[in-house]
Image (tube, rainbow, N blue to C red):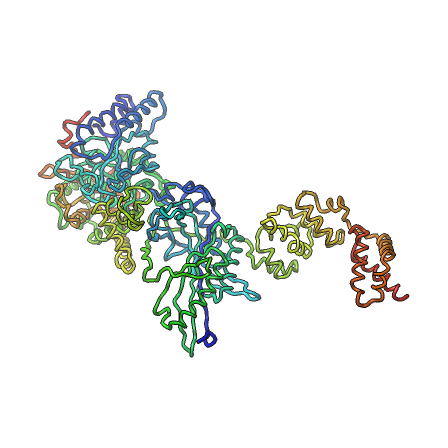
Amino acid sequence: MAALTDIRDAIRSRACSSREAVLACIEAIQACDPQLKAFVSYDGDRAIERAEEIDEQIEQGQPLGPLAGVPIAVKDNLCTSFGYTTCSSKMLEHFAAPYDAHVIQCLNAAGAVIIGKTNLDEFAMGSSTENSGLFQTKNPWDVSRVPGGSSGGSAAAVAARLVPAALGSDTGGSIRQPASFCGVTGLKPTYGRVSRYGLVAYGSSLDQIGPLAQDVRDAALLLGVIAGHDPRDSTSVQHDVPDYVAALDAPLTHVRIGVPAEYFGEGLDPEVRAAVEAALDVYRQRGAELVPVHLPHLAYAIACYYLIATAEASSNLARYDGVHYGYRSEKVTDYVDLYCASRQEGFGPEVRRRIMLGTFALSSGYYDAYYLKALKVRTLIRQDFEKAFEACDVIAGPVAPTPAFRLGEKASDPLSMYLADIYTISVNLAGLPGISIPCGRSADGLPIGLQLMGPHFGEAPLLRIAHEYQRETDWHTRTPPVCANGTKE
Amino acid sequence: MSTRDLETKPVIGLEIHVQLATRTKLFCGCPLEFGAEPNSRVCPVCLGMPGVLPVMNRTAFELAVRAATALHCDIARFTKWDRKSYYYPDLPKNYQISQYDLPFSSDGYFDVPVGETTKRVRILRVHLEEDAGKNLHDNPAVTLVDLNRTGTPLLEIVTQPDIESADEAYAFCTELQKLVTYLGVSEANMQMGHMRFEPNINVHITRDGVVYKTPIVEVKNLNSFRSVRGAVMYEIERQIQDWLADPTYTLENRGKENRGWNDTREITEFQRSKEEAHDYRYFPEPDLVPVEISEAWLAELQADIPELPLDRQQRLQDEVELSAADAATIVGDRATADLFEAAIAAGGHGITLGKQFISFWLRRAKERNTSIAGLGIDAERLGELSRLTADGTINATAAARIAEHMLDSADTPMAIAQREGLIQVKDVGQMQVWVDEAFAANAKAVQDAVSNPKKQQRARGFLTGQVMKLSAGQADPKIVGELIDKKLAELAAG
């Protein structure tokens, strides 16, 4: 499977048809997905029909959208008017959304062909996709390991070249961390850059939709399609959408890269440290200035995040009660019972844990000590970044403390799983854009990611700087062994 | 011990929900329609489907600011939304979007006429929130949920506990209804549930110089003025009696409790105590941005506020010399008051028009279950009728007959008067002829009017009636009276 831009150009120049591109995807999925289990659902017939429509438009010389005919996958917490939107939860296993999310409308308008929907940690709560209420997704580089999460299905599908690109969502690192674990490029845009309308909410003040792709160019192309103000999302911002792809070729002069000491402290795997430092060296050799910066409140980020995200989640997930739609318990006697039993049976243990944490944090008598204090810490973290960006253009560091861990390794220890989010969470709390790009491999052959973080609405320079690294290196072109048989060029 | 030995002071605050007169819901574009097919005025947003987001209805916010301004509240320059969590089948998100610690307005007051005086009730706060749907329990085996009402914009008005009687509570509610309809903020239609009331009541009882406070009772969900008065009256008496029966029945011991109003038995019934109260787990709504109110926007909204009912009533009393009662009646309905003033502007005669509004038009409107404005008679014709009456072109009886015709035809009062022969005759010679004729035909009455003191008054009235009859109602009764008196005086003088 070639990259998104290449397929787009091939279809546009009639070197191949959309139908052929879609068929190649379907073949790859059929070959690899039984092993990887990246997809919750895919509908080949629907995709082929849509591809033929696009081919017809090309045939007739009609004006084409920027993704005309290109197959793409989306995380299964994005509402689609076709198929089911499960959030990988038993609660919504048979839930057919009555509308398309804003980003789905954007993809459709751009001519993309949505081929299927990918697995996630249930309601996007997790860092390994092991919390999926449906099944586990495997890491294409080593099927005994997790793909990361919660957008593990999207990351695995792109890494294994089952699709050229996919959409994910990132609340505390859910795009960047699986991108890092699977060796693909993943961007979490600025909060408010992409409309959340139709993204099933987890932590509303943190959630953001973004692309997972083979390289920065494809991520930029996809971001350009989904970014922009949407009147249906009051938190989406009226801010011009620049041509992110064109910006990749802008001249780059005197880049200052902030290096926060806090991102290289205790708990960072030496192999990850070495790979990230090597990546910083690449930038230095290209003339960038490395600037020490400080993010002193990093130590509080995890606690802060797990109060705010769970508080919002406890409220966002209150609607799944068995009354109006979704899973309803059979064995009930009254309506209170209906709520309790439906929620107990419909949600998995991690979702229930977070709902309980969040409910507690918002309870009378605890609100000030937990939720309100977390909001204050959040402000401090945001101010840390604002101050740091006075001295640099982007901040660089690792995405995750380790490469992909083994399936089941942390499943019984939620706290160690939470701690693995240490480097990604601050970006969500501060509402900033962050990108993960492959920058090396561990001795075990597992991908390692470099994280670059930018100021609010600084996607264009962020992508430009990330692209510079990919011009100099080829980590992003490496493909995992699992798709050797399924690869089609 | 009887209540006569006690000094009792009822302490009453009101929480009132008023449905705003927007076309669409507070956070989505669904139309507001009373009585529509269940679950037909809904969309993914108000159904609380996964992934949806609310968007504030700007008109609702503007109406709310208008109401709060008229209640003399401070308008916050920065206000936010909060989620209030509770599980109920008619609340599809299982949280309500409301305003908690930063309501858009607070600290106002409302002057309410009570009898001959005016009562000032302080307003604690006014905020906006969304309504829930309705659970229908028609069939005992199942509960059906209708979500058409879900997301309807509600204004919640909370007063300070300044109200001291059922009459004051009643007056506050009716006056508020007048205010919000005046402002165009709400249709305030009671039958459609546009206003719902929750009085908080307790009584401060003084005995031997010691003050005892009864538990604060919140009576939930009253939807008529009558039930507000009934519930408050009942509660005051009940609380005093319960305290007399059990001196531990105090706020200190029992805290707050919720009771419901039984409309049939006209009593309140216990629902739950404070210990069982919900923990609503309020927190800021992350899906909505805070509202910042600029000075320019506020000035624009405040410029839109029309003259308020009490001010208008006073002006009509001063300018048109209406009585307080008549002015209040006319001002009670904004459209009617507008019509009244338009009729005066069109050349109507104020006092006469006022009398005709109260004695004739209001009665006809009530018969037809509408307001005077609802009768559909234009201001020009109303004004003309009053003018013709006032200048003597027609008399009062003729005016009433013309008005009847005006209800069914678009003709001017003058045209009707001419067609029906109701123009008052001012020819004194002709009137003298009728007077002479009536005297000649009724010798007995003439004799009584001249010389029987007991029957004098009635006989004179009879003679006047006979003259009017001869004139087919067209004689000017004033002149006829003068001619009769003159003739009787001549006869008496012999």
Residue B462 screen position, x and y as percent: 79, 59
Q: Extreme right residue here?
A: B494
Q: Total marks drawn?
A: 0
Residue A234 screen position, x and y as percent: 37, 45
Residue located at (24% from left, 25% from top): A23
Residue B327 screen position, x and y as percent: 61, 58
| Quadrant location, the N terminus of chain A | top left
Q: Is residue B131 left or right of residue B70?
A: left
Q: In the depicted view, which residue is nearer to us: A341 or A333? A: A333
Q: Is residue A239 left or right of residue A211?
A: right
| Quadrant location, the C terminus of chain A | top left
Residue A285 in sight here:
no
Residue located at (67% from left, 56% from top): B355
Residue B140 in sight here:
yes
Determine whether A346 is above or below A74 in the image: below
Quarter of image, res B464: bottom right
Q: Extreme left residue here?
A: A443
Residue A413 screen position, x and y as percent: 15, 49
